Amino acid sequence: MERPQHITRVVLVGITWLLSMQSGFSQHAYRDSIYKAYSRGKMDKWYTIMHGCEAQVDANKVEEQLELLNYYYGYTAWLVGAEKYDTAETYIDKSEELIEKLLEESPENATLLAYKGAYLAFEIGISNLKAIFLGPKSMKYINKSIELDPENIQGNIEKGNSMFYRPSAFGGDKMEAIAYYIKAIESFEKQGLVVNNWLYINTLTALGQAYEATDQIQSAKLCYEKIIRIFPNFMWVEDELYPDLLERHKL
């Protein structure tokens, strides 16, 4: 079984509020199906659902295009983490084309700017040699996102990912990453974007891993237990991360 754990590892939504809106192509149905695929580690199912969504998207409806971008984002992150680089490049190209189109219409959309930074980070994930010149560009877009909207979910997720995975010699700081993940999680919860939301549970998981990485073991334990309580049958945490934590630290 393939686990979607690399989604957290690479990254890298303000737009997730759109997932709660009704539209002609039934955003709720796609959202719930994507969540089920994610929670069971079925990225082949994710692919099928994503392409069903792609076929139904109305090019004149921004909210539908943004939801599709959310699915591209998760799938691309998984591809990069799984080292399926050729396919990842295809989705990076598709996503960046969509991002640029939407930015032309809304150049100061904080979520789109965060995505722009995330996709540059994906390219670094494929080739670390690109970090020297793409890293600063990625951070420029992410920082701009947070500058425009300090509460933006995607901006805070991407800032957290950057702080977590960047070497400390280049400005990385895992403790700072925790603060950004917490801010994103609080925004999800304040806006009521927690039910069957793959990105919310993914961000909670990233927080748990960040706690582990900074030796805050009790906080990591509580974070994983929250995930298990709210999202039963999320296989990555329930079957792997949580029991591994208990075993390693004899909790």
Image (cartoon, rainbow, N blue to C red):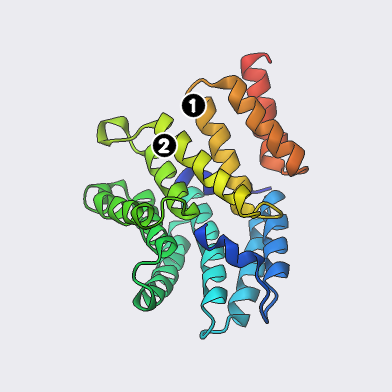
Q: Amino acid at mark 2?
A: Phe
Do the residues under discs 2 and 1 have CB atoms within 8 angstroms? yes
State which quarter of the image contains the C terminus: top right
Decide which of tag 2 and tag 1 comes sooner along the chain: 2
Q: Position of residue 197 (x, y in %)?
A: 65, 55
Q: Amino acid at mark 1?
A: Ala
- Mark 2: secondary structure: helix
Q: Position of residue 68 (x, y in %)?
A: 55, 70
Q: Residue 181 bears which disc, if any?
A: none
Tag 1 residue: 213
Q: CA distance from mark 2 to mark 1?
A: 9 Å
Residue 6 visible, this angle: no
Q: Residue 164 bears which disc, if any?
A: 2
**Residue appearing at x 57%, y 84% in the figure:** 58
**Residue appearing at x 62%, y 15% in the figure:** 249
Return the residue nearer the eye: 107 or 42: 107
Q: Is residue 227 above or below residue 71?
A: above
Q: Position of residue 85 (x, y in %)?
A: 43, 57
Image quarter for residue 118?
Answer: bottom left
Q: Position of residue 38 (x, y in %)?
A: 66, 53
**Residue appearing at x 38%, y 52% in the figure:** 146
- Mark 1: secondary structure: helix
Image quarter for residue 21?
Answer: bottom right
Residue 60 visible, this angle: yes
Count of marks placed on residues = 2
Disc 1 crowd rating (10 Å Cα; few below 14, some 14-19, many 20+) is some
Question: On the picture, is 217 further left or further right than 110?
Answer: right
Q: Is residue 55 above or below residue 195?
A: below
Q: Residue furthest left?
A: 133
**Residue appearing at x 45%, y 48% in the figure:** 156
Image quarter for residue 115?
Answer: bottom left
